[in-house]
Image (cartoon, helix red, strand yellow):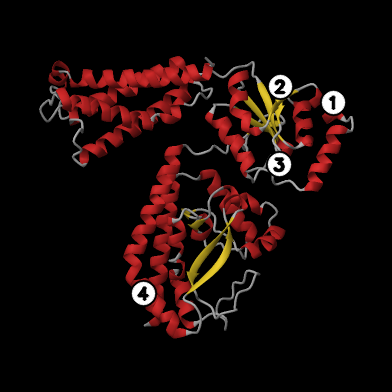
Amino acid sequence: MAIRWRYRLASVVGTVFLTAFAVLVANHILVQDLFSQVPYFGRPAPAVLADGDLTGAISTVLVVTLAAMWPVFKPRPRRILDTMLLTQKRVFLAMVGLAALGYYDYSYSLPRSTLMLLTVFLLAALPAWMTAIRRRPSAQSRAIIIGDDPQAMEDILATTDIPVLGYVSPPSSYATEEHRDTAAVELADGGTVRQRLDELSNLGGLSRLDEVFVKYGIDTALLAFSETDRAEFFGALDECYEHGVTTLAHRDHADAILTSSVSRGDLVEVNLEPWDWQDYVAKRLFDVAFALAGLLVLSPLVVLIAVAIKLDSRGPIFYSQERTAEFGDTFTVYKFRSMFVGGEETTPNEDEENDRITRIGRLLRKTHFDEIPQLFAILAGKMSVVGPRAAWTDEETLLEEEAESWRKRWFVKPGLTGLAQINNVSSTNPREKLRFDIEYIRKQSFWFDLKIVIRQIWNVLEDVTQTNTARR
């Protein structure tokens, strides 16, 4: 069995055993009696579960703990302190989850005293176990090259001292025919790239990356992609993260957004860490809850706005537009129409106070109410509540001319609001907008999203208040 699979098995089995044992010990009458002597924390009186209640409690604790500990089960090479801190953080998250179940009077909720004893035991036992079985960073790395850029491969081979066992070279679905022909010539003309790659084995395509990692015990991947804003790059990055493989790239072929700001030598570590499935679930649940709540609360306002638009000017109630989505895909976004029919332009324009905008349109834009229909796109999964603002597809070319790295915004799903929006930066200033969007991509987390949403809601309330005051 491969080392990383032995680690997975040992970490899961150890967590199950230690968690179940901790519940049994904490539930014992002698332990409960001793804990009741502790001032303040030992109250109320000990509560000992039995039979079906104890079985249900153990099952609940195991499910919650295993779900919270999932990132720790990934066989990444970690140092002792990193292992302990990550494990304790996840134990604390599990205990908060169990406390929340108890707050809602769940059938198998733990008594307060048992939960406190369980927390103390697991905060000590699980980090110790994970530290004992952890994958240690190795001085003798086993690496492969993953990519399709011959020049990047050449630079990596000329730079690294890490033993390279072979390369995985997926066909590039986004490269042009001209790019493919050039690459083929560079690899076949007897130059340095061909000679160096001839010394390595072609281990297959990207679809076999999982097998390659397991078969050869790879712990380092040297990325050499010609582009980093497409699904192939992220698929390789996610596979590396799943298997605990360190990802490096040559600094001359790496985007600043992807790599560590501080690094040594020509090879830099890719630190754009894929989210765990819990992060995706939390973000999606938040998106759905926000969209449903918004549509429910604002439904009377939606009817009033629709009537006002029809009375104000000729044309449809909604305005549709093709926007750029994640990884360059497109989707249709709907907004309440705020302009006369035929008044759209490709070039971003700050001057909204002109004849192209209707009377009700000025009010909708000022209060941001024209954005309400986009809640349906969030429900459909085309957008998120927080993310880089989706740009008009016809506008993308113009924006890329001013900001060369504009496509880095495609790394994540577009959002209703974002870091650029709460800082009042629009597409009329693409470089500044790109800076905020890249900063969001680097820092994104559930709590960061929540802060942005609160800030945006506050801004909307201020705009609505100011609009009402001005009308008076």
Tell me the element at label 4: helix
Nearest the viewer among 203 and 296 is: 203
N-term-proximal mark, 3 vs 2? 2
Q: Please tell me whether mark 3 or mark 4 is closer to you in this view.
A: 3
N-term-proximal mark, 4 vs 2? 2
Between the residue at mark 3 and the residue at mark 1, the CA separation in whole angstroms equals 22 Å
Q: Looking at the rendered structure, which numbered label has been put on residue 206?
A: none
Q: Who's the residue at 61% across and 19% down the image?
A: 215
Residue at numbered disc 3: 172
N-term-proximal mark, 3 vs 4? 3
Amino acid type at image mark 4: Val
N-term-proximal mark, 3 vs 1? 3
Q: Please tell me whether mark 3 or mark 1 is closer to you in this view.
A: 3
Q: Where is residue 78 in the image (x, y as percent from the top left)?
A: 51, 23
Q: Looking at the rendered structure, which numbered label has been put on residue 303?
A: 4
Between the residue at mark 2 and the residue at mark 1, the CA separation in whole angstroms equals 14 Å
Q: Who's the residue at 42% across and 57% down the image?
A: 455
Instruction: Answer above or below: position of 234 versus 88.
Output: below
Residue at numbered disc 2: 164
Q: Please tell me whether mark 4 or mark 2 is closer to you in this view.
A: 4
N-term-proximal mark, 2 vs 1? 2
The crowd level at tag 2 (other Cα within 10 Å; few <14, some 14-19, many 20+) is: many
N-term-proximal mark, 1 vs 4? 1
